[in-house]
Image (cartoon, rainbow, N blue to C red):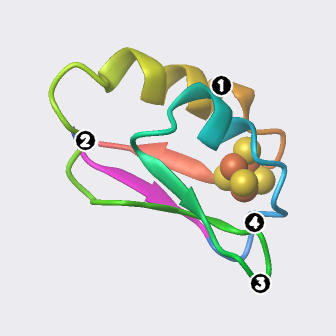
Amino acid sequence: MKVKVDQERCQGHTLCAMRAPEVFELDDVDGHSSPVSEDVPPGQEGAVQEAVRSCPERAISVS
Ligand code: F3S
């Protein structure tokens, strides 16, 4: 599974990082989220799906 965060859409709501802290990191300056790695680590798929659903900006996509 691959994950991306659309930087144009992300508004720094942080819910993704709460749902999947091993997958998403937040920028210290603007608070925007980005994946630690585009490849989702084994066992994190469910947490990533929750993050996708939780993002109010629909900024996260998986493939
Ligand atoms: Fe950004 Fe959505 Fe996460 S707005 S910080 S990708 S919950």
* Vertical position of residue 11 compared to residue 60: above or below: below
Residue type at the position of mark 2: Val
Q: Which residue is mark 2?
A: 40
Is residue 51 at all visible to an observer of this figure?
yes
Residue type at the position of mark 1: Arg
What x and y, as percent, mark residue 25?
Answer: 53, 58
* Mark 3 neighbour density, 10 Å: few (under 14) some (14–19) many (20 or more): few
First in sequence, mark 1 or 2: give its number. Answer: 2
What x and y, as percent, mark residue 45?
Answer: 31, 23
Q: Nearer the viewer, mark 3 or mark 1?
A: 3
Where disc 4 sits, the SS reads: loop
Q: Quadrant of the N terminus?
A: top left
First in sequence, mark 1 or 4: give its number. Answer: 4
Magenta residues? 2-6
Residues at discs 4 and 2 in contact (Cβ within 8 Å): no
Q: Which residue is mark 4?
A: 9
Q: Which residue is mark 1?
A: 53
* Mark 2 neighbour density, 10 Å: few (under 14) some (14–19) many (20 or more): many
Q: Nearer the viewer, mark 1 or mark 2?
A: 2
